[in-house]
Amino acid sequence: MNEPLTNLVPRPGSVTVTDGFFLLDAATRVEADPSLGGVASWLRATIGAATGCYLPPGDSDGGGVHLRIDPGLPAEGYVLDASPGGLRIEGGSAAGVFYGAQTLRQLLPPASLRRARIADGPWRVPGCRVVDAPRFAWRGVMLDVARHFMPVADVLRLVDLAAFHKLNVLHLHLTDDQGWRIEVPGRPLLTSVGAWRETTMLGSRSHSAFDGRPHGGFYTGDDLREIVAYAADRHVTVVPEVDMPGHMQAAVAAYPELGHGYAGPVRPSWGVSSHVLNVGPEALNFCRAVLDHVCDIFPSELIGIGGDECPVTEWQESAVARERARAEGLSGPDKLQPWFTARLAEHLAGRGRRLYGWDEILAGGAPPGSVVAAWRGVAPTSHAVRAGHEVVACPDTSVYLDYRQSDDPGEPTPVGTRLTLADVYAFEPIPEGLTAAEAALVLGGQANIWTEHLESARRVDYQAFPRLCAFAETVWGPPARDFAEFSSRLPAHLARLDALGVNYRPLAGPRPWDARPDAPGSPRRLDDRLAQLHEMTADLRRSAP
Amino acid sequence: MNEPLTNLVPRPGSVTVTDGFFLLDAATRVEADPSLGGVASWLRATIGAATGCYLPPGDSDGGGVHLRIDPGLPAEGYVLDASPGGLRIEGGSAAGVFYGAQTLRQLLPPASLRRARIADGPWRVPGCRVVDAPRFAWRGVMLDVARHFMPVADVLRLVDLAAFHKLNVLHLHLTDDQGWRIEVPGRPLLTSVGAWRETTMLGSRSHSAFDGRPHGGFYTGDDLREIVAYAADRHVTVVPEVDMPGHMQAAVAAYPELGHGYAGPVRPSWGVSSHVLNVGPEALNFCRAVLDHVCDIFPSELIGIGGDECPVTEWQESAVARERARAEGLSGPDKLQPWFTARLAEHLAGRGRRLYGWDEILAGGAPPGSVVAAWRGVAPTSHAVRAGHEVVACPDTSVYLDYRQSDDPGEPTPVGTRLTLADVYAFEPIPEGLTAAEAALVLGGQANIWTEHLESARRVDYQAFPRLCAFAETVWGPPARDFAEFSSRLPAHLARLDALGVNYRPLAGPRPWDARPDAPGSPRRLDDRLAQLHEMTADLRRSAP
């Protein structure tokens, strides 16, 4: 009866077992603070069809479910009390109550997580008191919908799965060399040309194999508004990213005047394109107009502008870039990116927003108030906070979920360093050696799902789970964690993922149909990657305060 | 304001425009007959998050939404009355009320169909009286999850889309030569071996191209129970099919003792396998055990056993088959299939079920009480009813949605005859020349979605829509239809599909990224196909009463 109390993921701050159980049945009503109507409706819609307990509003004569805000609790924290007399969830805010309700879902049998009723119950919640609150404010997952387009329904499903694990940020990587996924008024070629490619590379670059199949798709403004609203209903903020000034080949393919003479198609291969944005007046106005549209759709205070991996080769040969550098008093075209990033930051500030960028924006000085996604290993997190920036830690060597999960030759398209479940579980967002003040600038962490090799929601599931469950504990729970203890909880949690229809990687290893012999990978050794990252971030060390 | 009244799909029996409008808002309550709690909950969950109108139970002081059963109406029929004073839906049964509620969803703006709120409203329903009932009791769609596995979430989404078009049967083709998708207790190899193939043919057989990528997946019993329950909540019956005695190479690959010595893998190519079931005692017991498990999961009165395209070549050379034919007094192995089908029908009858099979089961006499899915053109429908069988009309030349939608060279993997939207709209389930009594045996029609070339839900969407909208009118509406009139309603309906996230084929033709140059098709001319069907059904004409 008490089994779910010892199997919650992410593990709550404290769980006290009490007597008896709370019985949820068709007569159970839910009484909620007026501001919590959304949580009650969500809970009703989530468990109603699976349990037959639709939780209509009402007070069940004092029993039943009670949802309350207690401003004395941490904003995202909650206390859940289950007893034969009733079930009470108090949260510091609606988000806290929502997380208490997510814990309630895990305290019920896994069948309650399905979308229709396959079991008769009884739907018992073991008597308990759960006191819980997150360690970090930013508990994110990034989804790359540029390399492979993902239909709206699949994105919403990922939002549900993220929220189930008490994550609260979905960073959407909307554009890249291989595809532009956001419809922009007045710029129809971004989608009619930029949203598809003629063929797609199979496996990693070393193999030069292509599938010969066009791939495309984009989101309308209303599609994105739906994603934003759906996520908000689940206390997830969608942080959009339009990657600039590099990773823009799809935009340049649509509007060659944005580039330096490139007149070819959207990029069909992986890796970084040299066909970047020119930084002339027209190109800058284009970026501002795109960001205005993004701000119209996404209420997120932070707006991602990418800023990663921008080769300067075209700028060095381009009259537009050289003229811009001269006009702005820059010593050369290689100084253009910080200048460009600062212009975007100013523009966003005019809309009441802040700039969010990959850690390359630290080179030459990131705009004040901008937030850094620190991905090139652990070092950039420290560099960012020492430069006074808030930072989201997402080191590829810990939380890049496209990286291979094991050395098993059956892993699909193995790329990157090996990131086992234990490796992800060992992730610590705050690097060693920071002062308390510096550590306070670490907003949290983010697991990144790049989709070069993930062409479907099933493949995304396979890469994300169960590693995203482990990741959730690194940003929700206290720093002291024990992988063996987590592992003991995991089988019960996998039964929940089964009920949710998640195509997670089996603990025993890939199934025969998970293999991708047609799309071979390119595994890296960790020490090689660490050396490479050290080299890649040399400029940060040179400019460190 | 009255626009949606003229744009409903499928078109209702009658619509009368009345004054004013009914305003749905956050205060609107729903009063429902006790037996209609499920419809109210579904409606609440469906439109609540998108409109902010959560329709709590209550009577809104006489206004509000009222759901009632009126036994005087046809079982699946309904009357919807919308006026400033309230909105009333009366149905002949819960299903009728459900269809009235589906019409209500179409009377609201398309934004109400999204899964979260992107618009403020007002949520107005034009004043009207809609009187409506279906023509046919069987309004089906078949999904082949054997050729390509489809995750549970995508199947549930198709159920929603089918129900939105007032369809009420989902025929699930669960097994075939290329994959076995249902977990069966005590038969683990059906899934560990039978549920995946090493590679998949790209395009039609004439090209002999393969993708070199394993493909697999299967449903657990609970997964299928969830699909059944979810569909039942939407008044859709799931009719399972386990195809026997042909189309069984996946099962034979798992358990070679079921076959005639074949010891190879699951079939990677399309077309019909010659590796069929042997009909010895062990194989028959296997089939009975599988059907028992299927009956445990699926409450459908009808249970599909396939029965199509079973080559007799292996039977002619097999000692087991010859012995069986001799023991049963059959003139030869070619008489084995009717004998086998009769045994399955007996077994199903013992479970209170009836057999459902493709029209090949008519050859040699289908078991009494069995229902025929007539697919080989129009003729088998007539043959079936003249032999006294109930029949579901699904002629490939009208409703095989994997067939190409146009002659456009950009159509993905064009196979079959050309089936334009107009061709599907012209489908008539009751062939000419039947008596009234014979016509009464035509239960309805079914659109079939074979998935050799549809590897994802997006591809299924493309093939199914908008043709499934046209199909819905052929089974819901009266026989007199006008394609031009349908076409005038379609743009407004496509806006609904946009809100529902359906990747329908644009009316203007395929987008560049819909093409499949890597998987070329094999289009057929209609006259060639008609001649082929005439030949294929020669045995039916010879045995006609």
Image (spheres, coloured by chain):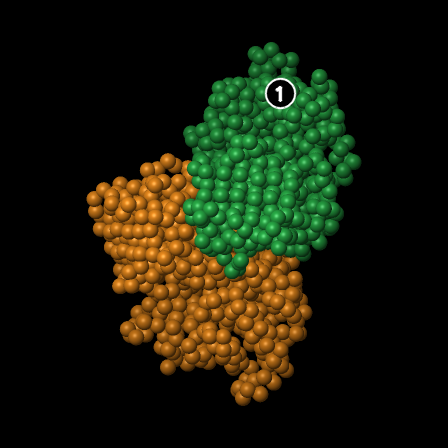
Chain colours: A orange, B green
Point 31% across, 59% down: residue:
A69
Relative depth, front residue between A448 and B457: B457
Task: Tell me if mark 1 has few (under 14), some (14-19) or many (20+) residues whose alpha carbon lies within 10 angstroms of its own.
Answer: many
Decide: is B80 above or below A238. above
Percent coordinates x, y for residue B528 in the rendering:
77, 35
Q: Quadrant of residue B359?
A: top right
| Residue occupying the point 53% across, 31% down | B71
- Specify whether B25 is left or right of B487: left
What residue lies at 67% left-to-right and 69% top-to-bottom? A263
| Vertical comparison of A75 with A342: above or below | above
Q: Secondary structure at mark 1?
A: loop
Quadrant in which the N terminus of chain B is drawn: bottom right
Q: Residue at 50%, 57% (x, y): give it.
A: B117
Check the picture and name the quadrant holding the C terminus of chain B. Answer: top right
Mark 1 belongs to which subunit? B
Instruction: Name the residue nearer the viewer: B421 or A396.
Output: B421
Taking the view exactly as shown, the residue that stands out farthest to the left is A19
Amino acid type of the residue tagged 1 in the rendering: Ala
Residue A293 position in % (x across, y down): 55, 69
- Please give the residue where the numbered disc 1 appears in the rendered image: B366
Hey, which residue is sitting farthest right in the picture?
A: B527
Q: Is residue B371 visible?
A: yes
Residue A503 visible in the current orientation = no
Residue B372: where, in percent of width, then height? 62, 26
In the rendered image, residue B325, in percent from the top left (x then y), is placed at 59, 15
Give the left or right position of residue A310, taking residue A473 as reference.
Answer: right
Compare residues A474 and A406 and report the one nearer the observer. Answer: A474
On screen, residue A506 above or below A383: above
**How many marks do you count on the picture?**
1
